[in-house]
Amino acid sequence: MPFEDSRRLTGANLFFSATGAVLDAHIPMGDALLHAWRTRVQQAGARLRWLRPKSMARRHAGGTLLAIAAPYDQLFLATEVNEWALCASLVERDPAHWAGLEQSLIAAALDAAENSPQPSSDSRPVLDTASALARFERLASLESHPKLRALLDAAESRQLPRVVDESELTLGSGEGGRTFALAALPDIADVSWRELHDIPTAIVTGSNGKTTTVRLLAACARSHGWRAGYNCTDGVFLDDDALATGDYSGPAGARLVLRERRTQAAILETARGGILRRGIAVSQADVAVITNVSADHFGEYGIDDLAGLADVKLTVAAVVAPRGLLVLNADDAQLRARAGELVRRFERCPPLGWFAVSEDQHTLRDHGRRGASTCGVQEGRLHLTHGGTAHDLGLISAMPLSMNGTATYNVANLAAAALAAHSLGIAAATIAAVFARFGSHRSDNPGRMMRFDVNGVIVLVDYAHNPAGLRGFLNVATHLRGASGRLGMLLGHAGNRQDADIAQLAGVAAEFAPDLIVVKEDESHLRGRARGEIPRILRAELERLGFSASKISMRDSEVQAARHALEWARPGDVLALPVHSTNARAALVAMLEKP
């Protein structure tokens, strides 16, 4: 088949703020072929009477993506329209080469419908334009859900948030929301609209620091008096109660938070993968934070560089309310450059707030002079300006999360969270009080910069899953090492990264010249790789960089790797242990806390 990935977009996405579908064609795509593809998509959209049947193309290293906007109750059909438009264009261009394409489409469609007891004749795709358009009209009537569409429109007109998945519709959110089965939706007149309302909602995305920023915001919300629901890579929580465990940083986690009737404020971690696969689950938010953009996950879903990754993160701008705030990292060159494209992408741009760690940040001062909200470092203190009022949030070195000011990436997380929290209506004094204590207990931010003292050995446990994160982590570890202390560390990577990205992680480790590197198998994140493959790449790169083989050990699991590092360490040493599996982290913490 000439395409690799055909999927529905159920919320604001990389291409536009509407729902739709996207197809990834992995063939050479000249301008003429792309024009024919797009023309057919527009033709079908007009025939189906889709409002604003627009399309958007994005070229990448492996091919071309074409996204088309479509109503929520036509998304399965939209994927078929996109596939037909591409395949019909290919056959028209080179009928001899693509002679068997229609039969391949039919075979794939019948295979997908094999669980249906009585597949209809419309399960068979057809490339002829007249026949295809007639088929699409029949499929549109089958998929159409007038009640759903009417309720979505009614909620939008009332500026109410909406959350939809394959089985349920939620109108409002948290304590102000009600959820209905799609199979039994009420009429508009039967909905108690006056009982429905929004709750304060923040979205957090970025390459590093998402979970820490989410937890900071949740702590501020709790101190303000709200019951805070939040989702992150560790699960879904209501205050301190776990509603679900595991990686819930995608749409499923956001839906659980927003459908929890006890939630009074929602803090939603929104990872890159969920945005690319399905779009953003929530229809509106009061504030969104982008912590930073750094090299990670290149080669997936057509994203090959930092500019593309920044565009993915900036998708959150599409759901920020007109009077809300989009919080951006002024130290990040990609975010500074790409923020100017938001009006072109989404036909609007929410108010911007900027944070920075650098004391001489020109962008921060310039935006502040123009009245924008800012948060940054001045003479070792964290200063927030919002709504024309300045607030001193305290000495950074006294904030536990900053590790005496050495964890600069956590200083950035504090600044971002301060802007977002104040935008939600939380008082600066409350924020300052939270920052003065958050991080003093390991339970505040589990898995992130956890510090232990084991018989004179300083042990740091963190998530540090990409080069930028690892470099920040090792900077802190280096600051904590005494004059005669040694540095030991773990090194591993998830399997869904390119070989060059894996090698780059080894390069960062080598920069710090540790006395021991335990290369580990990240057994919970193989993601298509064979066991041992990632450790071999890491070890080969370390040796290529001249790292002594005597300082490298190999272990088959994260727990085994951590145990070996602990056995090696002596008083005065520092161990930097990036651990990515929740189960492995729990086992390691139990080991470190054992009397």
Image (cartoon, grey):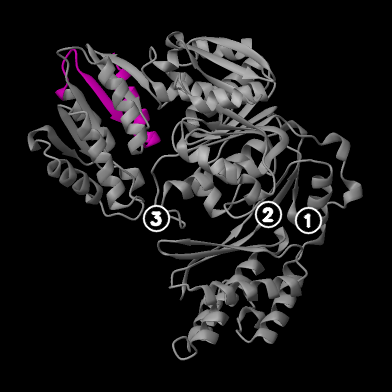
In the rendered image of this protein, does residue 243 appear above or below residue 49?
Answer: above
Q: Is residue 272 magenta?
A: no
Mark 3 touching mark 2, by CB under 8 A? no
The amino acid pointed to by label 1 is Leu
Instruction: Tell me the residue at 67%/56% (across/down).
Output: 19
What number is the disc on residue 18? 2
Instruction: Tell me the residue at 68%/63% (across/down).
Output: 54
Where residue 226 appears, as percent x and y from the top left, is 68, 21
Residue lying furthest bottom: 96
Residue lying furthest right: 189
Q: Which residues are magenta?
A: 568-595
What number is the disc on residue 299? 3
In the rendered image of this protein, does residue 352 appear above or below residue 359?
Answer: below
Q: Where does the C terminus fall, quadrant-wise?
A: top left
Where residue 319 appears, as percent x and y from the top left, is 67, 42
Q: Is residue 577 magenta?
A: yes
Disc 1 to disc 3, C-alpha distance: 36 Å
In this figure, what is the number of numbered marks? 3
Determine crowd level at label 3: few under 14, some 14-19, many 20+ residues with C-alpha closer than 10 A: some
Where residue 320 appears, as percent x and y from the top left, is 67, 38
Determine crowd level at label 2: few under 14, some 14-19, many 20+ residues with C-alpha closer than 10 A: many
Work out whether mark 3 precedes mark 2 in sequence or the reverse, and give the earlier one. 2
Work out whether mark 1 precedes mark 3 in sequence or the reverse, and give the earlier one. 1
Q: Quadrant of residue 483?
A: top left
Q: Residue under label 1, please give it.
A: 148
Where residue 381 appears, as percent x and y from the top left, is 49, 11
